[in-house]
């Protein structure tokens, strides 16, 4: 069970490290001409900071062995997940949005003949939260 949990937690950490790099280091974010230079600075900083934390999570999982190290790594993953959903819940306070006009298009799901659009950020965060929670349940059994 612990190996599966460590693998899931690692997957979540690696996705939070490299997923935003793929999504944000391009014209939709970091070099978006519609964004202010200061906003572009912050998105690059945020992505690099998260990548560093993710690499530390992987190190804690595979490079250390102290009581609770797997749960600690999972809780560190939850920092990214919880702050995503807190930001989502407070978007109206700062006029935020999950997407930009020239950003990444939403996923399209055809469910019973009805096309549903799901934001890529929300979809990804939900999947990663679920995987991390499964890992925690496996560790606590």
Image (cartoon, helix red, strand yellow):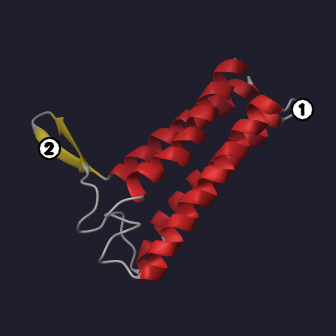
- The residue positioned farthest toward the right in the image shown: 66
The x, y position of residue 15, in whole percent, is 51, 41
Residue 92 vs residue 54, the one in the foreground: 54
**Residue that numbered label 2 is attached to:** 115
At 73% from the left and 40% from the top, the residue drawn is 73
Q: Secondary structure at mark 1?
A: loop
From the viewer's perspective, is the residue at label 2 or at label 1 nearer? 1
Left or right? Give the position of 29 relative to 45.
Answer: left
Marker disc for residue 67 = 1
Residue 26: image location, x then y, percent: 36, 60
Q: Quadrant of the C terminus?
A: top right
Question: Dot 2 lies on which element?
Answer: strand
The x, y position of residue 71, in whole percent, is 76, 37
With 34 as the anchor, is 45 left or right in this view? right
In-front residue for pair 93/31: 31
Position of residue 46 relative to residue 22, above or below, is: below
Question: At x 58% / y 58%, what residue is drawn?
Answer: 48
């Amino acid at each position: 069970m612990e190996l599966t949990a460590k693998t899931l937690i690692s997957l979540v950490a690696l996705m939070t490290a490299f997923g935003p790099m793929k999504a944000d280091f391009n014209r939709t974010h970091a070099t978006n001409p519609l964004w202010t230079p200061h906003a572009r600075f912050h998105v690059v900083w945020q992505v690099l900071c998260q990548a560093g934390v993710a690499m530390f999570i992987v190190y804690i999982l595979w490079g250390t062995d102290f009581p609770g190290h797997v749960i600690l790594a999972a809780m560190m993953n939850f920092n990214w997940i919880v702050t995503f959903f807190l930001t989502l819940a407070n978007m109206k306070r700062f006029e935020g949005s999950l997407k930009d006009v020239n950003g990444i298009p939403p996923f399209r799901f055809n469910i019973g003949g009805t096309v549903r659009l799901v934001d890529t950020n929300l979809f990804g965060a939900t999947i990663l939260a679920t995987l991390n929670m499964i890992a925690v349940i496996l560790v606590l059994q």
